[in-house]
Image (cartoon, rainbow, N blue to C red):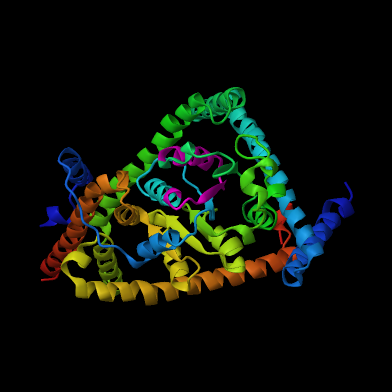
Amino acid sequence: MSVVVRKYIPLAIVAVLGFFMIFSYPLDNAVTTAASSSLGKWVIILSSFALGLGAINMFLIHGKRVTTRETGRWQYSLSLLGSLVIVALLGFTTGVDSDTYAFLYDILIGAGRLTFVSLRGFFVFSAFYRAYRARTWEGGVMLAGTILVMMYQVPIAELFFPQLNVFTKWLLDVPFVAGNRAIAVIGGIAMVIMAFRIITGIDKSWMGGSD
Amino acid sequence: MSFLERIPRRIAFLILALIVVIPLVRPFPVMVPISDHTRNYYDTIDSLEPGSVVLVGANVGTRDLEMYPQLVATFKQLKSKDAKIIIYNFSPGAAMGAIWLFEDSGYTDLTYGEDYVHLGFVPGEDSALSAFALDMVSTKQVDHYGNPTASMALFEDVNSIEDIDLVIASGGGTPGPDNWARIISIPYGTLSLVAVPGAFAARQYDYIALGVWQGGLIAQRGAVEYESLTGFAGRATSMYAPLLLSSIVLLLMMIAGNVVFWLNSRTREG
């Protein structure tokens, strides 16, 4: 494949569409709105294909593990592929809203997720008691903040120490929001820079190469 | 003293297990003060006109004790206000949860396609949501069950975000409420609410403070407060005592652990 097809055409498509999407926002007329809406629909179609591609990729990676009997891993890969096939077949044959499919989803994924979250509660409980120590003054401030916010959320403070709650609410409304907003703004600026680097072709890592 | 500083993990697990089990065996009522953001959430829905159209980004895949009861109670209040619901899912698992939500809130007693629509999973995250906001019917041409959206009564007068009276963004992680805020609520200024699990609440306090969300249900406590306001007491309320007790004991153990650590440090230094 020539370098033009492999490199320059994808870069040109990204640049043209990227700049179009940026400028269609402030232009806000019927033509650009319709065009950007169409591009959005393309994403839905491409994302649907990506789901199928993901399933094929799973078969390639885990199928290889099963066929080569990779030590300590092939059993898990087999169960993964088995589950994938059974759930997909059931979905295709009985429909995704059938009682059988719903039952399988509920007892496997639903119960599994809730079990995982519940178990996490035990680890958090143990870790908080055994490891959350104010070893430095910064750690002490963090611990004090944790205790205050927990008392606010539980809500012990609201019931027994209303004055303390006023301070905790200020902590959440002012320093917490300010810090969070600063992180969001920095993240936003980083996204703009990243988008600019991709659209202008400075960053080509999405093509599988390096900068 | 040093034993108290590092109680073995098994004992910590046993303590938590006991704390969780006791209120399950002998349930007791818990009074929770109503937060401002929960009250605003309730008031926003309460102020809807009959026939209002509500777009719900429901990312609930399990019958958990946080988002699921939040949304069941929300749907019940929406039903009491004769509101019409359109559900949009960011994940395939959430499409299953949406069916349960309609069933458990009583929406299935109403007319499908006219009073409520389940659009199902829409791949494409931000780009898809952005296109959907501009042109709903042509972006999502069939619903979760394969019915054409163009032939549904609900979509006769509704085809863009401008026709939506209220947006409710629910879910944890990405894609989730952040996407709804970024793509819908901020650029279009649509009246919006949020319902999130505790682990993903941090960012939402900021959006509530900014007024992006008019109100919000945060974690199981939010669900309990909201169930209390609506009068639709559900699983969140009945299962709040174990959470409350374990949180109090965790708080006490955390303080005790640090006091013991501090005393032991002084002994070691002395």
Left or right placement of residue A140 versus residue B164 in this view = left
The part of the image, by quadrant, that contains residue B34 is bottom left
Left or right placement of residue A69 versus residue A47 in this view = left
Q: Which residues are magenta?
A: B79-104
**Between residues B128 and A58, which one lies in front from this camera angle?**
B128
Identify the residue shown where x is 83% and y is 60%: A12
The part of the image, by quadrant, that contains residue A188 is bottom right
**Between residues A98 and B166, which one lies in front from this camera angle?**
B166
- Measuring from the top left, give residue B105's x and y in whole percent: 42, 42
Please check the rendered image and state whether residue A1 is part of the magenta-colored stretch, yes or no.
Answer: no
The part of the image, by quadrant, that contains residue A36 is bottom right
Identify the residue shown where x is 37% and y is 74%: A173
Identify the residue shown where x is 56% and y is 68%: A187
- Measuring from the top left, give residue B106's x and y in whole percent: 43, 40
* Quarter containing the C terminus of chain A: bottom right
- Measuring from the top left, give residue B136's x and y in whole percent: 67, 51
The answer to whether one can see residue A72 in this image is no
- State whether residue B120 is above or below residue B180: above
Please check the rendered image and state whether residue B94 is part of the magenta-colored stretch, yes or no.
Answer: yes
User: How many numbered marks are there?
Assistant: 0
**Between residues A81 and B93, which one lies in front from this camera angle?**
B93
- Measuring from the top left, give residue B140's x and y in whole percent: 67, 46
- State whether residue A47 is above or below residue A185: above
Left or right placement of residue A53 versus residue A201 in this view = left
- State whether residue B21 is above or below residue A139: above
